Image: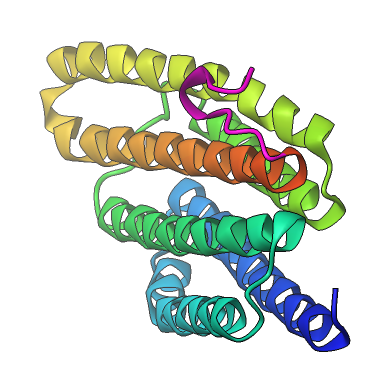
Amino acid sequence: MSVHLEREIDKIKKRVLSLSAIVEDQLQMSVRAMLDRDEELARTIRERDAEIDQLEIEVEEECLKTLALYQPVAIDLRLIVAVLKINNDLERIGDLAVNIARKARRLAVLPAIENPFDLSGMAEKTQAMLRDSIDALVNMDVALAGDVCGRDDEIDAMKREIRRTSEAMIGREPEHVAAILNLMAASRNLERVADLATNIAEDVIYMVEGKIVRHGEGE
């Protein structure tokens, strides 16, 4: 690897890690706003979304510039291709955090209800998947990436259980239908975050080993 290419790749890594840190923070705050019914915190999440969008553009431009100028091969090429995909997934997670914050703002002005399902536990597991997928990227840790992929089924099962519980609760407590629907929508957003964290982990495996594991390929 040339010195110039090495510098560009280091710059790309630093930018995508800056983006991932902000996205992780946004997701954590959106969940807290939802669980604490904190309308003010939810509003700040929407205001920070433009920062994520701008960083996503900068990472993409840096990757494309490096591809054009240095024509990297082998693992360097795979890294840049993986970062382009991860960059997009992180921006989408940022959007999902905004969606959760929007639900939190709606929930904050509705009559309080006792949460009948483990949305907090689902959020913790989802955030751990995202955190570990980023750690796998930083450390190029294929084993950790594989572990993240294996946890996605648990989140899917939790979302299905939340939906079943919500539908039953709507029948019993129609006066709380708006609050229940917002909580159920937040669980769908969390499940989608888990899917995107799995995508990131799969891209780490591709970057390190050149294996495409999505849809069971390369296993």
* For residue 214, side relative to residue 22 (left or right): left
Q: Quadrant of the N terminus?
A: bottom right
* Depth order, front residue of 105/13: 13
Q: Point out residue 4 in the picture as x, y percentages from the top left corner.
A: 80, 88
Residue at 65% of width from left, 41% of height from top? 206
Which residues are the magenta region?
210-219
For the stretch drawn in magenta, the main secondary structure is loop
Instruction: Please determine whether, in this image, residue 26 is positioned above or below residue 161.
Output: below
* Depth order, front residue of 175/35: 35
Residue at 52% of width from left, 18% of height from top? 216
Picture colour scheme = rainbow
Residue at 75% of width from left, 55% of height from top? 75
Q: Point out residue 194 in the picture as x, y percentages from the top left corner.
A: 51, 37
Instruction: Please determine whether, in this image, residue 178 is positioned above or below residue 149.
Output: below
* Depth order, front residue of 114/193: 193
Q: Quadrant of the C terminus?
A: top right
Q: Point out residue 211 in the picture as x, y percentages from the top left corner.
A: 65, 33
Q: Point out residue 7 in the picture as x, y percentages from the top left corner.
A: 81, 85
Instruction: Please determine whether, in this image, residue 76 is positioned above or below residue 127.
Output: below
User: Is 214 covered by the magenta stretch?
Assistant: yes
* For residue 13, side relative to residue 218 (left or right): right
Instruction: Please determine whether, in this image, residue 90 is positioned above or below residue 5.
Output: above
User: Is 34 covered by the magenta stretch?
Assistant: no
Residue at 34% of width from left, 35% of height from top? 188
